[in-house]
Structures are given as C-alpha cells and as structure tokens.
Image: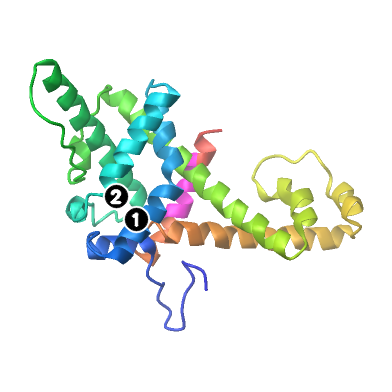
Amino acid sequence: MALGEKGSSGNFRTTRWTIVQRSKGECEEARVALGDLCEAYWEPVFLFLRSSGRNDDESRELAQSFFEKVLSAGGGFGGADQERGKFRSYLLGALKNFLSERRRYETREKRGSGAYHASIETGGFDGMAMEIGDDAADLAGIYFDQQWAQTVLVRATKMMQREYEEKGKGKQLEVLMPWLSSGRVEKAQSEAARELGLRVGAVKVLIHRMRQRLGELIRGEVAQTVNDGADIDEEVRYLIEVIGSGK
C-alpha cells in the first residue's frame, strides 16, 4: 500500500516526515527518512538559491552546504513548526535561517572574527531575516513553492511512467499524457484513438483512469512531506494553486 493510503483502521500510515519529526532526527530510521526527503527535494532549494541572483556554481555549493547541515543536525528539529507540520515549510525556513546566519558570518569575517556555525532551527518563520529585501524574499518564497509543486508533479509522473512501462503500456501513456494536464490540448482524442488502435470511448476511459492514478501518486508523494494525513488534501490544493499561478 502506497504512502498516503488508508489502512484497515481508517488512519493514514506514518509518513517519512512524521518519522523525522517524532524522533527529532536522533535515530537511524529518521536519518534515512530525512536523507531521502532532502534528495527528493534538492531541486527547489537549488532553484530558490539561483533565483536570488546567484550563478549555478554558487547555488550548487550553497545547496550542498545547506543539506550537509540539515543531515548532520541531529536534534535540530526542535524548532520545526508543529502546527504547520509540512516538510516544505520546515525546509524553506531552515534555508532562510542558514542564509541569514551565513551572511552574518561573512560580515564578521570581513571584520576579522570567528568560525562559522549555522543553525537550522526554524522557530519564528515570520521574523526570519534574508539577505535580500522583504518583498524579494516573499517572491523567492513563492518561487520556492512553485518549484516544490513542480517537483512533486514530476516525481509522481515519473512513477506513473515506470508503472505503465512495466505493464507494457508505455505507448498509451505517451500518447495520452497531454490530457493529464489542465492545459489546452491541440490534438483530438479521435486522432489519439487511431494512433493507439482503439475506439474514442476506450480512450476516454483510459484518460479518466490515468488522471485518477496520477492523482493517487501525487497524494502519495505529498503524504511523505506532511505531518498529518488530514493535511494531504490541503497541501495538494495549495500546490495545484501555486503551479497555476506560475503559468
């Protein structure tokens, strides 16, 4: 059963982010879970850094340093926002704090002081400082969420592609993929039906099933990054919204 699905008791299964939060990163299971999540969502962090005016090399170096701090932080989850309970929120708050402390360190270095020890505590999101102005920081945060949403969609789509290829139905998915998005499709379904050697009615059924499956995979991906199963629908709606706002 995939993450995010309901078990026989009606409760959502424990997610990787929940494991990390509950253990505060102190056990091997939590470290593995956190490592998997960081690897999965490296791209939004890198693109967030690049969108702030840095070049690729600097953004990559900063992202690497940040994740090294996160993965070696152990009990640093004490400041995570328990009410919001989303790995997305935690990671962005931790990244902002990392950048703020790094900026302060670089300022001290210019004055000839001390070693650099960045904290990733994330209590107090609202007061988090950035090395760019407040308006720019807000825009960068929105950009981060848009990239996060795209990453969720891409990961779910790749899982679906693997499933269809394993069943020998990769051609079906390739031809019908345009109808899985909310955008306008120039190609007629009758043309797709001819290409697949199917009736139009059968194509409509396949598209419906594909949309359902993609939705399930997206929910499963989101379930790994929220603290409570009840938050899944809210997070999915938000990610769909920010994808739409980025068009």
Q: Which mark is residue 34?
A: 1
Point out residue 12 in the picture as x, y percentages from the top left corner.
Answer: 41, 72
Dot label at residue 14: none
Q: Quadrant of the C terminus?
A: top right
Toward the viewer: 216 or 103? 103
Magenta span: predominant SS is: helix
- Residue 50 pos. (x, y %): 41, 26
Q: Is residue 247 above or below residue 41?
A: above
Q: Quadrant of residue 132?
A: top left
* Res 227 visible: no
The boundaries of the magenta stretch are 235-242
Of 65 and 89, the residue lying toward us:
65
Residue 104 within the magenta-colored segment of the rendering? no
Query: What is the x, y in percent for residue 7?
Result: 46, 79
Residue at the image point whose x is 26% and y is 60% from the top: 21
Q: Is residue 55 visible?
A: yes
Residue marked by disc 2: 71
Please indicate whether residue 19 sits to the left or right of residue 239 in the image.
left
Q: Is residue 236 magenta?
A: yes
Amino acid under disc 1: Leu
Does 98 sit left or right of 67 as displayed?
left
Q: Provide the secondary structure element on which disc 1 rests.
A: helix
Q: CA distance from mark 2 to mark 1?
A: 7 Å
Say which amino acid is labelled 2.
Leu
Q: Quadrant of residue 172?
A: bottom right
Look at the numbered discs 2 and 1 and tell me whether their residues touch, using CB distance below 8 Å: yes
Q: Secondary structure at mark 2?
A: helix
